[in-house]
Amino acid sequence: MKLNLFDSHVHTSHSHDGQSTMEEVCAQAVSRGVMGVAFTDHYECDIPEQRLGVRDALAELPRFRQQYQGRLRLGRGIELGQGHLYPEMAEEILGSEEFDLVLGSVHTYSPGVDIGAINFNKPEVKVSDILEKYFRDCYDMAVWGRFDVMAHLGYPERYIWGKYRIPVSFAPYEDIIQATLKLLVETGKGLEVNTSGYRQGLGKTIPILAILKRYYQLGGRIVTLGSDAHRAEDLAADFEVAMDILTGIGFEYFAFYRERQPVMLKLI
């Protein structure tokens, strides 16, 4: 059994697609021996109805911090989608709230159209176009830099292969992926190891092993673990697998964030 479990990517019913309350997540964390949770409800800059719940979640959090004091560390987080494309919208929330962790995410292909909603079986849908734009957006987000950790780098494969069983190769995008990882290292940003792929048909972490290895080779040492749970029962799911992958690469520590700064935990 692994120790030092801290889940840095968790959604509640304050997210448009979250199914469990904050109270249910906290109870699950204690029962599973999880030491900490960062609540990172959605704030999609280009989808108005998907940025309504973050402030409600943040307002609710102090009550549970008090209730679980000494038993569970609870982080004030946000999953900020497409912030680099809508910097004024992003700065409005970043400047008005205090966060422990800001996840930077790219979810949409065009304004308001989540990649997960695309029907990849349609002949007019070109996987290469979507991947090219996605990885370019991730690089541009890294240049923008107003986040702490890049979430689920390689997100489209969750659907292209995980749902539609269309084979995916990242080889044509190696240069832009390399540039993105290098920029993350140079600017001290973290890289998330997202375990949702094991639950959603992908059968691997996001990012894939090759990207995690490349981040390490470039000097990256700040990795967080995120279940991307939208239900309490998925909290810290498959973390033991992910932690073994990290130690196999050479990582000795993973991180959680407090007041926008990484706190390193031993992989044990």
Image: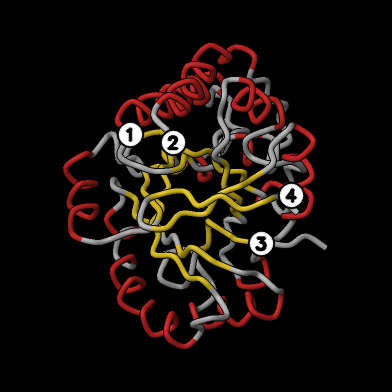
Report the label total.
4
Tell me the quadrant of the picture where the N terminus can be found. Answer: bottom right
Lower position in the chain sequence, tag 4 or tag 3: 3
Closest to the camera, between mark 1 and mark 4, is 1
Q: Which mark is residue 198?
A: 4
The residue labelled by disc 2 is 189
Front residue of 18/95: it is 95
The Cα–Cα distance between marks 3 and 1, rounded to whole angstroms, is 27 Å
The image shows residue 94, relative to residue 107, as above or below, that is: below
The residue labelled by disc 3 is 5
The Cα–Cα distance between marks 1 and 4, rounded to whole angstroms, is 29 Å
Horizontal and vertical percent for residue 49? 31, 60
Horizontal and vertical percent for residue 244? 79, 45
Front residue of 73/145: it is 73
The residue labelled by disc 1 is 145
Lower position in the chain sequence, tag 3 or tag 1: 3
Name the residue at 44% across, 82% down: 64
Furthest residue toward right: 1
